[in-house]
Image (cartoon, rainbow, N blue to C red):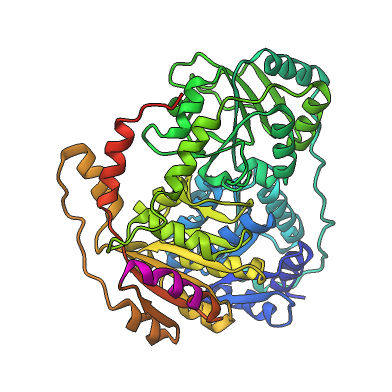
């Protein structure tokens, strides 16, 4: 058989369902091998969209999303999505066609050293130089991508190697079991928790990846310890839970930070520094830190651990529960009451354009607890991270580490493929929407209905927010937009325009019922950005 056919068999062997990408001249043998495969190839409109689809698919399923491009510009178009997935710990395998090995040593059409290009943004990058190594390379790529902490692998596949004849078979899929933390470390951490007057939990995305959300809530309930989450861990504890303090991650002090100010012990569970740097919540370097994660703590002057439990997160939490009796009820009722009151403050607001808080309130009312919001990057992301009340893990997906615009629309498509039973809303600014809006055609073609909710302010709102904070004035952030309703309809999608605060909720309900791709153009009042900045700047922690 051809090497390309063996390559596809190896990918099938990994349990892969979808490959996202664009065909090209240098990957024709791979594309032909896909014809007889059970893999479903999703032909996208841009390689960046393909990488974002693989990114979100990997994050939601825990199985490596796969994206494919040709060489040169096709491969470089993958880079943003690959970097995003790698920094946000989403398993992904990227494959690029390459020119024949007979011309890689010299200046040649569309030739780039792709392995060295992808190496800094992946866990593993290699080139297939002989057809016989295909089973080993594919198995390693998936094993490395999916191993905790997950990330990306890249495979460069020269066209002449893909066309060669070869004998071989896929390798057995294996993955190591996560070890349990040593008992003496559990005892050490338990002693620190017993001695603490006001412990608090910082939950990161690693809790979701480990499937340990229920275990963490059980642990918190037994010991009565409040939980704050990073943006990427929203939903680890339902916001409606009395021990939930909401999300941390804003660049300024928020009410949830009052809990960290008061704490004398912080339990960081499944937390990566890229989610929210410890200098933001441990500026004084005066608190005990217990690190519970699959890997040892990163070196940072604001993150010196008193005890580290490295290994299975669930096993660590179970071990601590076995060591400890229930603690007194924490005195967080005043703090949580303020946070909850803020969420409800704009429920009946009638202002237009619509305030961010009102948009998110209405969105929360129409979505079920397991429905999914994919947030793009912009001013709206900060409001989503702060104010959207997630009730379950992986129901609010935010590009956080790399924070790349353009992820929402392709990400929503991937979310529907990952679980067609869950309704999906791509929540995006007008700028981020137009970066990958062409993937609406892909979604309509492959039959993945979802709603795109555009926060329309005709400018780069987040940049304006930063400019106003820094200089009191803005510059070079304005742009024009098309008629988003007509634009959606030109693709064959549904289009809606919100004309008043009372219209948003019924439009959302209708769009979710449409069973197609629906676009909602919603004018947003971003004057609330600076009002929030001023409010948080004057924040006094509740007692």
Quarter of the image for residue 35 reads bottom right
The one of 114 and 427 positioned closer to us in this rendering: 427
Query: What main secondary structure does the magenta stretch of the protein show?
Result: helix
Q: From this viewpoint, is residue 480 visible?
A: yes
Residue 312 sits inside the magenta stretch: no
Residue 208 at what x, y percent from top left? 66, 46
Q: How many marks?
A: 0
Tell me what residue is drawn at x 60 percent, y 19 percent.
Answer: 305
For residue 14, above or below residue 442: above
For residue 470, above or below residue 344: above
Residue 507 sits inside the magenta stretch: yes
Residue 81 lies left or right of residue 243; in this view the side is left
The one of 123 and 184 positioned closer to us in this rendering: 184
The one of 469 and 173 positioned closer to us in this rendering: 469
Tell me what residue is drawn at x 21 percent, y 44 percent.
Answer: 467
Residue 90 at what x, y percent from top left? 60, 51
Residue 198 lies left or right of residue 182; in this view the side is left
Quarter of the image for residue 479 reads bottom left
Tell me what residue is drawn at x 54 percent, y 83 percent.
Answer: 445
Tell me what residue is drawn at x 41 percent, y 34 percent.
Answer: 254
Residue stretch in magenta: 500-510
For residue 522, above or below residue 542: below
Q: From this viewpoint, is residue 158 visible?
A: no
Quarter of the image for residue 473 reads top left
For residue 326, above or below residue 236: above
Outermost residue to the front: 348
Residue 253 at what x, y percent from top left? 38, 31
Residue 334 at what x, y percent from top left? 50, 30
Q: Quadrant of the N terminus?
A: bottom right
């Amino acid at each position: 058989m051809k090497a390309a056919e063996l390559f596809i068999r190896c990918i099938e062997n990994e349990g892969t369902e979808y490959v996202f990408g664009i065909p090209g001249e240098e990957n024709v043998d791979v594309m032909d091998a896909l014809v007889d495969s059970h893999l479903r190839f999703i032909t996208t409109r841009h390689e960046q969209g393909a990488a974002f689809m693989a990114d979100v698919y990997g994050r939601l399923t825990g199985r490596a999303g796969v994206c494919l491009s040709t060489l040169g510009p096709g491969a470089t178009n993958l880079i943003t999505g690959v970097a995003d997935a790698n920094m946000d710990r989403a398993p992904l395998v990227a494959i690029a066609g390459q020119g024949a090995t007979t011309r890689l040593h010299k200046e040649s059409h569309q030739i780039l050293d792709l392995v060295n290009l992808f190496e800094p943004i992946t866990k593993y990058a290699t080139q297939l130089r002989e057809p016989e190594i295909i089973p080993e390379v594919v198995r390693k790529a998936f094993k490395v991508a999916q191993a905790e902490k997950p990330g990306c692998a890249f495979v460069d596949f020269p066209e002449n190697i893909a066309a060669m004849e070869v004998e071989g078979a896929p390798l057995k899929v294996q993955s190591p079991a996560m070890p349990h933390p040593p008992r003496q470390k559990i005892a050490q951490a338990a002693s620190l928790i017993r001695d603490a007057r006001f412990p608090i939990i910082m939950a990161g995305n690693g809790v979701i990846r480990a499937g340990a959300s229920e275990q963490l809530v059980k642990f918190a309930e037994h010991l009565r310890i409040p939980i704050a989450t990073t943006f990427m861990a929203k939903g680890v504890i339902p916001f409606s839970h009395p021990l939930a303090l909401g999300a941390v991650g804003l660049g300024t002090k928020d009410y949830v930070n009052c809990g960290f100010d008061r704490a004398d012990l912080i339990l960081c569970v499944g937390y990566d520094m890229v989610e929210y740097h410890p200098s933001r919540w441990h500026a004084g370097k005066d608190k005990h830190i217990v690190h519970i994660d699959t890997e040892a703590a990163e070196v940072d002057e604001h993150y010196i651990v008193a005890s580290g439990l490295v290994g299975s997160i669930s096993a660590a939490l179970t071990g601590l529960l076995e060591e400890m009796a229930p603690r007194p009820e924490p005195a967080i009722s005043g703090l949580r009451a303020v946070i909850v009151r803020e969420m409800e403050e704009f429920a009946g607001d009638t202002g237009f354009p619509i305030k961010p808080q009102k948009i998110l309130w209405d969105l929360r009312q129409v979505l079920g607890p397991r429905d999914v919001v994919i947030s793009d990057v912009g001013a709206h992301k900060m409001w989503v991270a702060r104010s959207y009340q997630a009730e379950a893990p992986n129901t609010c997906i935010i590009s956080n580490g790399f924070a790349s615009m353009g992820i929402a629309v392709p990400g929503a498509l991937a979310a529907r493929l990952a679980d067609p039973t869950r309704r999906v809303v791509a929540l995006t600014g007008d700028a981020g929407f137009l970066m990958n809006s062409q993937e609406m055609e892909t979604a309509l073609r492959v039959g993945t209905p979802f709603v795109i909710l555009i926060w329309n302010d005709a400018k780069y709102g987040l940049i304006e927010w930063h400019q106003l904070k820094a200089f009191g004035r803005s510059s070079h952030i304005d742009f024009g937009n098309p008629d988003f309703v007509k634009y959606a309809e030109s693709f064959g999608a549904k289009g809606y325009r919100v004309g008043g605060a009372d219209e948003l909720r019924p439009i959302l309900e209708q769009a979710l019922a449409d069973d197609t791709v629906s676009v909602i153009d919603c004018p947003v009042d971003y004057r609330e950005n600076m009002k929030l900045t001023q409010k948080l700047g004057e924040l006094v922690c509740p007692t």
